[in-house]
Image: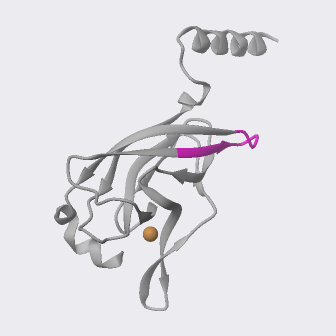
Amino acid sequence: MTLRIRHTLAAAALLALGMPAFAQTTIKDPWVRGTVEQQKASGAFMQITSANGGKLVAASSPVAGMVEIHEMAMEGNVMKMRSVPGLDLPAGKTVELKPGGYHVMLMDLKQTLKAGDTVPLSLVVEDKDGKRQTIEVKAPVRALGADAHDVKKH
Ligand SMILES: [Cu+2]
């Protein structure tokens, strides 16, 4: 009983502060790799921490016609990327999306992404009860050359 009351109070406190209930999932250091003209795809990277655990199930961006969640995996001797239906976010653990690992793949790009630009991203996180929340992130674009050795993987 005491626990239930505490829970209710905590929820009320969050509402009073105007904090969204999904504040339990935090996104740190989001960024997008810059592109050259005519390049149609790029990757978005960030650190995601879900306090109670959940799953990143979808993403979208106004700059991309299509967005997928990708992982890098060995196929034979070759490292390849492929789309996954979701990315598990274990409770309290920071999951890092980075070049050479998990990433949000921006495809069908509608514009060139230049260093200094900001790319809006909508990330859909599903909690353990199957409830979905959308988290809006503004990711700065970093120069393509900043991580040149990874570019060929894309
Ligand atoms: Cu990819």
Residue 128, by quadrant, is top right
Query: Which quarter is ligand 1 in?
Result: bottom left
Say whether residue 29 is magenta: no
Q: Which residues are magenta?
A: 123-131
Q: Nearer the viewer, residue 108 or 32?
A: 108
Is 48 situated above or below 104? above
Q: Nearer the viewer, residue 77 or 147?
A: 147
- Write the residue at 75% across / 43% down: 130
- Write the residue at 82% across / 12% down: 1
Indicate the colouring scheme.
Answer: one colour
In percent of width and height, residue 139 lies at 34, 45
- Write the residue at 58% across / 8% down: 16
In percent of width and height, residue 19 lies at 53, 19
Compared across the picture, whether 116 is left or right of 70 comes to left
In percent of width and height, residue 79 lies at 42, 82
- Locate the C terminus and report the quarter of the image it occupies: bottom left
Compared across the picture, whether 65 is left or right of 42 comes to right
Q: Nearer the viewer, residue 52 or 152?
A: 152
Is 123 situated above or below 40? above
Is 124 situated above or below 25? below
Q: How many marks?
A: 0
The residue furthest left is 145
In percent of width and height, residue 15 lies at 61, 13
The residue furthest bottom is 76
